[in-house]
Amino acid sequence: MKPLLKEIRSLELEDSLINYWPGETENFGSWVRVMIGPEDQEGAESFDILVCTPKWLQNELESNGPLLGRGTIIIREYNYDEIVDCIEKAISQCHADDWPSIAKKLSRISFWEFDDYQPR
């Protein structure tokens, strides 16, 4: 089974990422939600990733102190195609025999909507 990127959007920007252009391309940071599902099936689950530049990270460190790094993509400057390529490359490396196994692998590089879910 192969996972497929079905949608990507910012959780913080009103514009879609594809139409967005920051004032400073080297000072960008935004949480994005990627919808990923099985290549040959309908539906997808959400995975959240922080996409940011080193300059943005430095500003955050100066303002807020230490940051944790899970679910983060660091880019030189804002470039939509580069962001999508990075995400698609990571997704392509998460193949398995079933969707739960793939989703668990994807949750290592993102925050999966079902992280820590325990059925009652």
Image (spheres, rainbow, N blue to C red):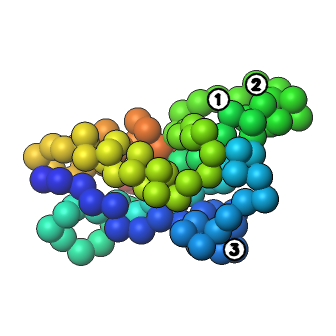
Q: Estimate the x, y position of residue 12 in percent, counting from the top left.
A: 69, 63
> Disc 3 to disc 1, how far (Cα)?
26 Å
Q: Amino acid at mark 3?
A: Glu
Q: Is residue 104 visible?
A: no
Q: Amino acid at mark 2?
A: Pro
103 left or right of 25 in image: left
Q: Quick one: label 2, few (<14), some, or many (20+) residues within 10 Å? A: few
Q: Quick one: label 3, few (<14), some, or many (20+) residues within 10 Å? A: few
Q: Secondary structure at mark 1?
A: loop
Q: Amino acid at mark 1?
A: Leu
Q: Which residue is mark 2?
A: 66
Q: Earlier in the sequence, mark 3 or mark 1?
A: 3
Q: Are marks 3 and 2 in contact (CB under 8 Å)?
A: no
36 lies above or below 106 = below
32 left or right of 34 in image: right
Q: Estimate the x, y position of residue 68 in percent, counting from the top left.
A: 64, 29
Q: Nearer the viewer, residue 16 or 71?
A: 16
Q: Is residue 8 visible?
A: yes
Residue lying at 47% horizontally and 64% vertically, measured from the top left: 8
Q: Are marks 2 and 1 in contact (CB under 8 Å)?
A: yes
Q: Nearer the viewer, mark 3 or mark 2?
A: 3
Q: Which residue is mark 3?
A: 14
Q: Which residue is mark 1?
A: 68
